[in-house]
Image (cartoon, rainbow, N blue to C red):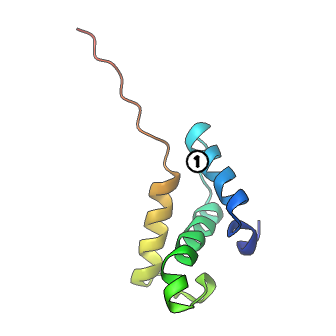
Amino acid sequence: MSRSRAYSGDVFHRLLVRCLAEEHQPTDEEIDLVAGKIWQDSYGLVTGQPWPDVVPDSDAHRQMIGAAKMALAPPLRCEASAA
């Protein structure tokens, strides 16, 4: 999947559904693609800097990767305690 394809809403939303509803464990590539989408929709709009130009392991890069991991994390399941 190319980075530009992930920036389209359709691909991005299908990946979110897959991770959340189907409990798919995202690959590093998928995490990077979602981080790029988050960057594009936030800081990238302000700075004009494309995601591929963000320096790997910079603060901004780590923050976007962290946000993508949180966005793709399956929801926590709370087990009902036996009373």
Image position, residue 63 (x, y; %): 41, 73
Image position, residue 43 (x, y; %): 48, 82
Vertical arrangement, residue 54 with respect to residue 69, above or below = below
Report if residue 56 is visible in the image. no
Report if residue 77 is visible in the image. yes
Residue lying furthest left in this view? 83
Q: Is 12 on the left or on the right of 2, as rendered? A: left
Residue drawn at (58%, 47%), measured in percent from left and top?
25
Mark 1 residue element: loop
Q: Which residue is mark 1?
A: 25
> In the image shown, does 1 or 45 lie closer to the viewer?
45
- Within 10 Å of disc 1 (Cα), the crowding (few <14, some 14-19, many 20+) is some
Vertical arrangement, residue 14 with respect to residue 61, above or below = above
Image position, residue 66 (x, y; %): 43, 65
Image position, residue 50 (x, y; %): 61, 86
Task: Say which amino acid is labelled 1.
Answer: Gln
Residue drawn at (49%, 87%), measured in percent from left and top?
46
Query: Which of the 4 quarters of the picture holds residue 51?
Result: bottom right
Vertical arrangement, residue 73 with respect to residue 21, above or below = below
Residue drawn at (33%, 18%), measured in percent from left and top?
80
Figure quadrant of the N terminus: bottom right
Counting every numbered tag in the picture gives 1
Q: Is 61 on the left or on the right of 32, as rendered? A: left
